[in-house]
Image (spheres, rainbow, N blue to C red):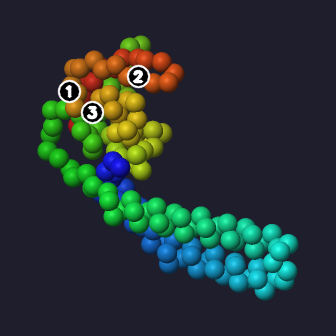
Amino acid sequence: MTTPFLTKEGFDKLEEELDHLRKIKRQEVADRLHEAIDGGELIENAEYEAAKNEQAFVEGRIQELEMLLATAQVIKNKKKVDSVQVGSTVTIKKAGADEESYTIVGAAEADPGKGKISNESPMGKAILDQRAGDDVQIETPDGDYTVRIVKIG
């Protein structure tokens, strides 16, 4: 199993979600279950089934977050580095396109729409340990392409 990487911000956000699930959501689901049980025949009670399914989801998510937070390596803000590392913000340029900037994060925090790509993604894997000025081949299921690393922050 690979070590999950999280930024301090991501770690705090997941801790907050876990706290919410434990203290609030768990009780909300328990209340729904009690209401459904009080509602009569359980065999044909759709609300009871929905509440049981939600309870299973909440408990599964709690376990997932507990494991993730227990094993995660929090990315420390590093001094200026010469090569791309987890936690680096990288500006790249693809031929014929505008420059794009991404922060390399662990898979649990990846959100390409917000400029956060996973170190396990095709691009993340390819640009790790590369330096500014390097041309890097990115291999994806949709085809290969090359980017130039313009800047590492």
Closer to the N terminus: mark 2 or mark 1? 1
Q: Height in image: 57 above or below 107?
A: below
Closer to the N terminus: mark 3 or mark 2? 3
Q: Height in image: 3 above or below 127?
A: below
Mark 2 vs mark 1: in front:
2
Residue, x 14% and y 44% (percent of image)?
Answer: 79
Where is residue 46? Give x, y as percent.
80, 69
Q: Amino acid at mark 1?
A: Arg
Mark 3 to mark 2: distance in Å?
A: 14 Å
Which residue is denoted by mark 2 in the rendering? Answer: 139
Asked whether the beta carbons under mark 2 and mark 1 sit within 8 Å of each other, the answer is: no
How many numbered marks appear?
3
Which residue is denoted by mark 3 in the rendering? Answer: 128
Where is residue 68? Give x, y as percent.
39, 59
Mark 3 to mark 1: distance in Å?
A: 9 Å
Work out whether residue 9 can be spotted.
no
Question: Residue lying farthest top?
Answer: 96
Residue, x 23% and y 27% (percent of image)?
Answer: 130
Where is residue 147? Give x, y as percent.
34, 20
* On-image quarter of the C terminus: top left
Q: Amino acid at mark 2?
A: Glu
Secondary structure beneath dot 2 equals strand
Q: Height in image: 38 above or below 46?
A: below
Question: Residue lying farthest bottom?
Answer: 38
Where is residue 121? Give x, y as percent.
40, 35
